[in-house]
Amino acid sequence: MNSRERFLATIHGDQPDHPPLFPEGIREEVLLSWRTQGLPDGTDLDHLFFYDQFEQLDPDVYPNPAILDWSTPQKLLPLLRQRLDPEDPRRLPNDWSESLKRWRDRQHPLFLRIHQGLFLSLGIEDWRSFAPAILRLVDQPDFVREILAIQADFAARLAVKILRQVDLDGVIFNEPIAGNHGALISADMYRAFALQSYAPIFDVLRDYRVPAIIWRSYANPANLLPEVVKYPFNVLWLCETPPGRLKPAQVRRLVGSNLILIGGIDSDILRKDNRAIQQAVAAVQPYVEEGRFIPLADGRVREDVPYPNYFFYRQELHRVFIMNRLLDSGPW
């Protein structure tokens, strides 16, 4: 099986030859540090480790030009409609035509990030813009709903434009909305504003039969998960979770067994010793065997993760989920 087939088998509840083993997206500054710790100069990690590659398409989903004042309905709403134009060719990458040709025979899953989440949709960029936007949720709910309706209509139309040209394996709703102690708004408020606004996008994804509708969040959005799973999301990708929180068993209790989970391996473990890493990989093995689970470090691999630790972690994933399965399958 190739990487795309493995992913789609997991989505459909089938058993692939082994679970997709996605890369973590190691940044250049981490590689520079690792080259002082034993990573040979010029070595591509793809040549050292087995990765099930995936590709994420990131169109420009922000108002263009940017909007500086989000406070006044009479000014903002017409600007937002004007500056969120899905037909603007700048929304898509410059190499769009070449990418379409390349994707026709691809062997890896292709995801589209279609929505940037509630807070970014309200113009929140930092703590100074956070408080006024949160107050608008309470004081101007109809204004907020109009903002989100415009954003969702734009996202739905952009999705149609893309889906007419390429078959996607998944669409990602990015949702940076939580801290380590929980989401920054209630589940009821999140449903009333964000989840209900996504209806036009869900309609498009259903019409085009997109296999994976992915809700990707960060830190600890546990209080939102029971509401999220009432909507058409069939994949949860939980990133940067606090140590000891949102372990797979807890997430399964919150969302049930039908959703696909991506993550589950605490990225902080990569700073510890080999035994801790081995135990962390072993801890997710039962969920992989049950199906609908893609094991992956749940956060970005940063510069303070030693290269020997990362090397051992990827080798352990390969040993447990590829080599052991080959051995269990019997003689050649």
Image (spheres, rainbow, N blue to C red):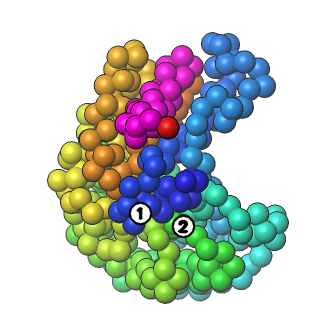
Residue at the (66%, 36%) spot, across then down: 46
The amino acid beneath tag 1 is Ile
The answer to whether residue 305 is magenta is: yes
Look at the picture and state if 125 lies above or below 278.
below
Q: In the rendered image, is residue 147 in sight?
A: no
Q: As drawn, which residue projects farthest toward the left?
A: 253
Res 272 quadrant in image:
top left
Q: Position of residue 330 (x, y in %)?
A: 40, 37
* Residue linked to disc 1: 11
Q: Is residue 228 left or right of residue 8?
A: left
Q: Earlier in the sequence, mark 1 or mark 2?
A: 1
**Disc assigned to residue 127:** none
Q: Main secondary structure of the magenta part?
A: helix
Look at the picture and state if 236 lies above or below 118.
above
Q: Position of residue 63 (x, y in %)?
A: 63, 71
The amino acid beneath tag 2 is Asp
**Over which residues does the magenta segment extend?**
304-331
Q: Is residue 305 left or right of residue 144?
A: right
